[in-house]
Image: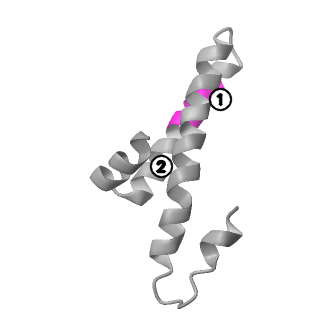
Amino acid sequence: LAGGKTSDAIGRKWTMAFAAVIFQSGGSLATSFTVMIGRFLAGIGIGFGVMIAPVYIAESNLLQEDHSLPSLNS
Protein backbone atom coordinates (compact mmCIF):
# COMPACT_ATOMS: atom_id res chain seq x y z
CA LEU A 1 0.00 0.00 0.00
CA ALA A 2 2.87 2.35 0.66
CA GLY A 3 4.54 1.60 -2.69
CA GLY A 4 2.34 4.04 -4.59
CA LYS A 5 3.02 6.93 -2.23
CA THR A 6 6.73 6.13 -2.16
CA SER A 7 6.96 5.97 -5.95
CA ASP A 8 5.16 9.31 -6.23
CA ALA A 9 7.54 10.85 -3.72
CA ILE A 10 10.94 9.51 -4.87
CA GLY A 11 10.20 8.06 -8.31
CA ARG A 12 9.70 4.57 -9.70
CA LYS A 13 13.36 3.74 -10.24
CA TRP A 14 14.41 4.72 -6.72
CA THR A 15 11.43 2.90 -5.23
CA MET A 16 12.61 -0.30 -6.89
CA ALA A 17 16.11 0.32 -5.51
CA PHE A 18 14.60 0.90 -2.06
CA ALA A 19 12.62 -2.34 -2.40
CA ALA A 20 15.82 -4.18 -3.31
CA VAL A 21 17.57 -2.83 -0.21
CA ILE A 22 14.65 -3.88 2.01
CA PHE A 23 14.60 -7.32 0.39
CA GLN A 24 18.36 -7.78 0.84
CA SER A 25 18.22 -6.75 4.48
CA GLY A 26 15.33 -9.16 5.03
CA GLY A 27 17.27 -11.93 3.33
CA SER A 28 20.31 -11.34 5.48
CA LEU A 29 18.19 -11.34 8.65
CA ALA A 30 16.39 -14.51 7.60
CA THR A 31 19.64 -16.45 7.71
CA SER A 32 20.29 -15.56 11.34
CA PHE A 33 18.17 -16.20 14.43
CA THR A 34 15.57 -13.53 13.55
CA VAL A 35 13.88 -15.52 10.81
CA MET A 36 10.40 -14.03 11.21
CA ILE A 37 11.62 -10.43 11.07
CA GLY A 38 13.71 -11.24 8.02
CA ARG A 39 10.83 -12.90 6.23
CA PHE A 40 8.59 -9.94 7.06
CA LEU A 41 11.10 -7.47 5.59
CA ALA A 42 11.66 -9.66 2.54
CA GLY A 43 7.90 -9.76 1.98
CA ILE A 44 7.66 -5.98 2.15
CA GLY A 45 10.50 -5.66 -0.35
CA ILE A 46 8.87 -8.13 -2.73
CA GLY A 47 5.54 -6.31 -2.37
CA PHE A 48 7.13 -3.01 -3.33
CA GLY A 49 8.89 -4.56 -6.30
CA VAL A 50 5.88 -6.45 -7.61
CA MET A 51 3.74 -3.33 -7.43
CA ILE A 52 6.17 -0.86 -8.98
CA ALA A 53 7.98 -2.91 -11.66
CA PRO A 54 5.04 -3.17 -14.12
CA VAL A 55 4.32 0.55 -13.75
CA TYR A 56 7.98 1.38 -14.39
CA ILE A 57 8.06 -0.88 -17.46
CA ALA A 58 4.84 0.64 -18.85
CA GLU A 59 6.07 4.20 -18.34
CA SER A 60 9.47 3.53 -19.87
CA ASN A 61 7.80 2.04 -22.95
CA LEU A 62 5.71 5.07 -23.95
CA LEU A 63 6.65 4.93 -27.63
CA GLN A 64 5.15 1.50 -28.22
CA GLU A 65 1.45 1.62 -29.08
CA ASP A 66 0.17 -1.67 -27.64
CA HIS A 67 1.95 -1.56 -24.23
CA SER A 68 2.47 -5.31 -24.18
CA LEU A 69 5.67 -5.33 -22.09
CA PRO A 70 4.01 -5.15 -18.65
CA SER A 71 2.02 -8.26 -19.46
CA LEU A 72 5.28 -10.13 -20.16
CA ASN A 73 6.44 -9.31 -16.62
CA SER A 74 3.91 -11.62 -14.95
Depth check, front residue: 49 or 4: 4
> What segment carries the magenta color?
22-28
Position in image of residue 54 (x %, y %): 56, 63
Asked which colour scheme the image uses, the reply is: one colour
| x 47%, y 89%: residue | 63
CA separation in Å, label 1 and label 2: 15 Å
Q: Is residue 42 magenta?
A: no
Q: Which residue is mark 2?
A: 17
Residue 15, compared with residue 43, is above or below; it is below
Amino acid at pointer 2 = Ala
Q: Secondary structure at mark 1?
A: helix
Amino acid at pointer 1 = Gly
Badge 1: few (under 14), some or many (20 or more) residues near its Cα, within 10 Å? many
Q: Is residue 22 left or right of residue 38?
A: left
User: Given the current orientation, which residue lies at the most extreme top position?
Assistant: 33
- Residue 28 quadrant: top right
Residue 13, compared with residue 37, is above or below; it is below
Sequence order check: which comes first, mark 1 or mark 2?
2
Position in image of residue 50 (x %, y %): 59, 51
Magenta segment main secondary structure: helix
Q: Quadrant of the N terminus?
A: top left
| x 31%, y 52%: residue | 10
Q: Secondary structure at mark 2?
A: helix
Badge 2: few (under 14), some or many (20 or more) residues near its Cα, within 10 Å? some
Position in image of residue 4 (x %, y %): 39, 50
- Residue 47 quadrant: top right
| x 49%, y 64%: residue | 55
* Numbered mark located on residue 27 in the image: 1
Q: Quadrant of the C terminus?
A: bottom right
